[in-house]
Image (tube, rainbow, N blue to C red):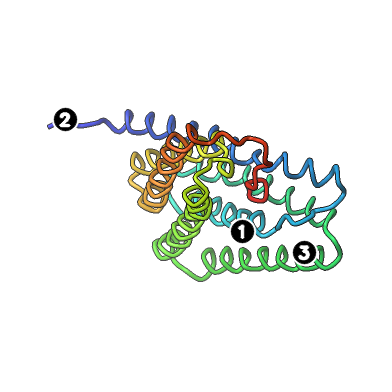
């Protein structure tokens, strides 16, 4: 029977994790055009700050799960999500700065609520639970958070099918999502961590669907004059 050595598994895991960190960077910088527009117009217009707030909470939970306090040998999960949290926090702060007064207040309150929720998760998992229990609970939170994040493009997928246009689904954003999901799915498999490979496996499937839709509808999409609505999403 063919066996893979522990050293080979470690090399493959680290390679997949590094690749995932690189591909994730493409996702983190994708909202930059949106915020350039916001800063240029000195107004958030109809853009919502909720996607960035949710992405921040997701990154915080996943970064915490990757620490040695929660799981074994998941440092690259912590690095990618720490960087992601910094990007998302920057976007939220910019949103607060340029939003109208009512949106500014609501977004700030939600930001404080996110920090409060994360503080509760951190404190409870670190001080109130033994390590196996905290690994299980925070692992399930991480898995649920990632699955809900990967499920968010279902709105765009439905929109593409309804409009028969890929105008609303930027190719490189879909490609980055797919590549990152594949990388961390492999990372989780090589590390025998279902809380990593299960949600990223779902992300891989959804990413594949987006790419297939792009290939199918791109040939039929001849109208490139409208501004992509995807700018409203991170």
Who is closer to the viewer here, 109 or 77? 109
Q: Residue at coordinates 47% horizontally, 49% vertically from top-left?
A: 161
Q: How many marks?
A: 3
Asked if residue 182 lies left or right of residue 79, the reply is left
Q: Residues within 10 Å of mark 1 (few under 14, many from 20)?
A: some
x then y, percent, for residue 3: 19, 32
> Residue at label 1?
54
Who is closer to the viewer here, 135 or 53? 53
CB atoms of marks 3 and 2 within 8 Å: no
Q: Residues within 10 Å of mark 2 (few under 14, many from 20)?
A: few
Give the distance between the C-alpha atoms of the residues marked 3 and 1, in whole angstroms: 13 Å
x then y, percent, for residue 194: 35, 51
Q: Secondary structure at mark 1?
A: helix
Asked if residue 40 lies left or right of residue 79, the reply is right
N-term-proximal mark, 3 vs 2: 2
Q: Residue at coordinates 41% horizontally, 38% vertically from top-left?
A: 212
Camera-side mark, 3 or 2: 3
> Residue at label 3?
108
| Residue 2: mark in rendering | 2
Q: Residue at coordinates 49% horizontally, 52% vertically from top-left?
A: 162
N-term-proximal mark, 1 vs 2: 2
Q: Secondary structure at mark 2?
A: loop
x then y, percent, for residue 225: 67, 36
Q: Residues within 10 Å of mark 3 (few under 14, many from 20)?
A: some
Q: Quadrant of residue 46?
A: bottom right
Camera-side mark, 1 or 2: 1
Up the image or down, 224 lies above or below 152; here it is above
Give the distance between the C-alpha atoms of the residues marked 1 and 2, in whole angstroms: 43 Å
């Amino acid at each position: 029977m063919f066996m893979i050595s522990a050293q080979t598994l470690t090399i493959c895991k680290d390679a997949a994790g590094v690749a995932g960190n690189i591909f994730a960077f493409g996702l983190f910088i994708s909202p930059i055009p949106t915020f350039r527009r916001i800063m240029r117009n000195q107004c958030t217009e109809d853009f919502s700050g909720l996607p960035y707030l949710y992405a921040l909470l997701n990154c915080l939970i996943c970064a915490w799960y990757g620490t040695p306090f929660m799981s074994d040998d998941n440092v690259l999960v912590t690095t990618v999500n720490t960087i992601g949290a910094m990007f998302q926090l920057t976007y939220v702060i910019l949103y607060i700065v340029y939003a109208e007064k009512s949106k500014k207040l609501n977004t700030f309150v939600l930001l404080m609520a996110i920090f409060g929720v994360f503080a509760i998760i951190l404190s409870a998992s670190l001080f109130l639970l033994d390590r196996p229990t905290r690994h299980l609970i925070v692992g399930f939170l991480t898995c649920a958070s990632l699955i809900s994040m990967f499920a968010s493009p279902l709105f765009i997928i439905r929109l593409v099918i309804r409009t028969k246009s890929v105008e609303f689904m930027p190719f490189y954003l879909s490609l980055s999502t797919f590549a990152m999901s594949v990388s961390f799915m492999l990372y989780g498999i090589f590390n025998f961590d279902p809380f990593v490979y299960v949600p990223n496996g779902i992300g891989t499937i959804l990413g594949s669907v987006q790419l297939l839709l792009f290939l199918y509808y791109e040939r039929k999409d001849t109208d490139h004059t409208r501004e992509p609505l995807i700018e409203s999403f991170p």
